[in-house]
Image: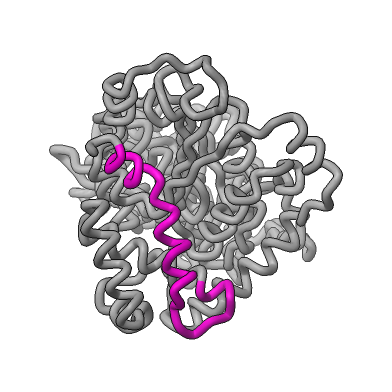
Amino acid sequence: MSLATLYSRAQDGIHAPLVSVEVHLSNGLPGLSIVGLPDTEVKESKDRVRSAIINARFEFPARRITINLAPADLPKGGGRFDLAIALGILIASEQVKASDIQQYEFIGELALSGALRAVHGALPVAIQTHQSLRHLVLPEQNASEAAHVSALPILPAIHLLDVCAHLAGQQRIEPFNLPEDHSQQTITTPDLSDVHGQDMAKRALQIAAAGSHNLLMIGPPGTGKTMLASRLPGILPAMSEHEALESAAIHSISQSGFNVSNWRQRPFRSPHHSASAVALVGGGSQPRPGEISLAHHGVLFLDELTEYNRHVLDVLREPLESGHITISRAARQANFPSRFQFVAAMNPCPCGYLGDGSDRCHCTSEQVQRYRSRVSGPLLDRIDMHIEVPRLSQKQLRSARLQNSVSSAEIRNYVKLTRDKQILRSGKTNSQLGSKEIEQYCHLQQQDSDLLDEAIEQLGLSGRAYHRILKVARTIADMDDSDAILTHHLSEALSYRKLDRARVATTT
């Protein structure tokens, strides 16, 4: 038989659509052609495959070889089809016997020697191979990544000959399994007890963690804003199996790849303020995930917020609301999830020392207003909490060092209990509540409703800000184990609108 069909997987965002690799040998002038919308890397595979077959001591057929990658309208990129193409040629030329080839899927790039090299995106391939109830044959370097999909038979191979021997029944490849304790690895993150003082900021950080709220910290240089932000992942609950797979799948298709030692650790992304809009949201001719997607189910921290280009910051507005980003290009679209917790830090003025208790700041009110206007109103509207992180005196710091600070592990347990209440009540954290759910779960007493209406009127807040205040108040009530939002819960939520109050003070 001069026709062979094998299965592989392409890459389309975080999805891995099935590709049928059809290899046909016919009479005519010797040559090899690949059809089915292959890009340059796929077209170049014919030279890699030829050398790999010859160096594996097989005969490269002196016939006309046609390789079809179906479906024809799906773009195919990378070297992931090398292994399937080489096996197809060997099976079609009857040099390898494989009666059960339909129960396998193959990915892997071939070296000229026939050795298998790792490819990006092994985890999305493993997820969808498992759904197809097939076995996955892949390079040994990708085995530990793909094996995080439980119950999927993973067959890691070092060389093309290993796969051929397995298919022929001569020497079976042993399925790869992760060690039993792989999911019990210790999560190493900075501890919140390292931060001395700043009790109000710690309280706000805990509220943000409990309800998955966005947070903006304003304060002079050196007051601990970055230290606080870097300790947020340590007080967040551990990721579920589903969340961990989603996060790992995004990292798997990124340029840096997925590090198995980070399994179930919430990502913390902190791009430099020189980052472009494409770096933040993703893009490219072949769309790749950006920082907001790499922070999925984790934290995106933007330090020195006002130093970012305003256009770059404004691309965050839609993902903050929807939890996903669609990258559109002329030839294709890619959809990446981006359900991240947004944390930012900024100075109160251009020199950074406004309100720190010294006379070092000489910024005028116009300069301060111009400086803060680098962050647009619509973006600030989407940040639930604005807090001040003031400078502490040496006496206050010494006093704070003598006190026993609560560890991140203790706070994490408390945060988990609070989140569990929210999940049990609405199936989601408070930050994700819709308008109808807010009406249902964030009901206020009449006097509290009047208080909030008056605050909204005085601060000139939008309907979005109104809802965000209610959601923060709901989280504070949950932390107090209160079924109803009480007056002090609402008052505390209103106190976390630092920039709104500052804007009103400036205009008056």
Looking at this view, is 479 or 52 the one in front?
479
* Numbered range of the magenta stretch: 477-505
Q: What's the residue at 71%, 56% (across, down)?
A: 171
Extreme residue in the left direction: 330
* Residue 387 percent across, percent down from the top left: 48, 46
Q: Is residue 253 magenta?
A: no
* Residue 58 percent across, percent down from the top left: 55, 37
- Residue 98 can be seen, yes or no: no
187 vs 440, left or right, is right
382 vs 298, left or right, is left
State whether residue 165 is above or below residue 288.
below
Looking at this view, is 245 or 395 the one in front?
395
Q: What's the residue at 44%, 74% (across, down)?
A: 487
* Residue 175 percent across, percent down from the top left: 68, 61
Figure colour scheme: one colour
Q: What's the residue at 46%, 52% (across, down)?
A: 341
Image quarter in which the N terminus is found? bottom left
- Residue 17 can be seen, yes or no: yes
Image quarter in which the C terminus is found? top left
